[in-house]
């Protein structure tokens, strides 16, 4: 039988399903939309562009509070300083 995306667990669709979702941190607010996903290592990262800066946000259940699939929003509670660290990185 045909199953709709709403009936399928996100794990079944793969992590790339979340590209385009907005990430909202419970403290900071909107961080932007997931542009890409770095999944070449065990530590999967959401790649988000926020204020012109590329943020690498760990895609871990420890930080995810809720996922609203209809609105395409991931609500996260990120550790204090995680975003500040990304903003000060230089390559």
Image: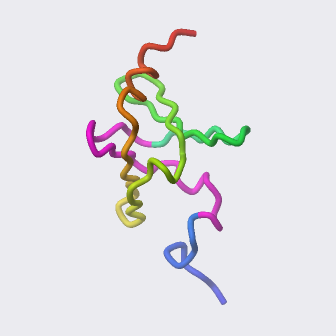
**From the viewer's perspective, is 89 left or right of 15?**
left
Q: Nearer the viewer, residue 71 or 61?
A: 61
Q: Is residue 70 magenta?
A: no
Residue 14 versus residue 26 in the image, above or below? below
Q: Nearer the viewer, residue 10 or 66?
A: 66
**Residue at screen point 40% across, 36% down:** 79
**Residue at screen point 42% across, 64% down:** 69
Residue reaching furthest to the right: 40
**Residue at screen point 52% across, 31% down:** 56
Q: Nearer the viewer, residue 46 or 64?
A: 64
Residue 91 versus residue 20 in the image, above or below? above
How is the protein colored in the picture? rainbow
Quadrant placement of the N terminus: bottom right
Q: How far from the left and from the top, in percent, is residue 18?
A: 52, 53
**From the viewer's perspective, is 79 left or right of 4?**
left
Q: How far from the left and from the top, in percent, is residue 77?
A: 36, 45
Count numbered badges in the picture: 0
**From the viewer's perspective, is 32 left or right of 90?**
left
Q: Is residue 26 magenta?
A: yes
Residue 75 versus residue 90 in the image, above or below? below
**Residue at screen point 62% across, 64% down:** 11
Residue 10 versus residue 90 in the image, above or below? below
Residue range of the region highlighted in magenta in the rendering: 11-33
Q: How far from the left and from the top, in percent, is residue 61?
A: 51, 53
Quadrant placement of the C terminus: top right
Residue reaching furthest to the bottom: 1
Q: Can you tell which quarter of the image residue 73 is in? A: bottom left
Q: How far from the left and from the top, in percent, is residue 85?
A: 44, 20
């Amino acid at each position: 039988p045909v199953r709709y995306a709403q009936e399928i667990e996100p794990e079944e669709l793969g992590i790339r399903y979340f590209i385009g979702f907005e990430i909202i941190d419970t403290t900071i607010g909107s961080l932007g939309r997931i542009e890409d996903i770095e999944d070449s290592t065990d530590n999967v990262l959401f790649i988000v562009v926020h204020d012109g800066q590329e943020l690498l946000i760990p895609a871990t259940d420890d930080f995810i509070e809720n996922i609203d699939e209809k609105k395409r929003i991931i609500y996260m509670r990120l550790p204090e300083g995680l975003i500040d660290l990304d903003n000060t990185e230089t390559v």
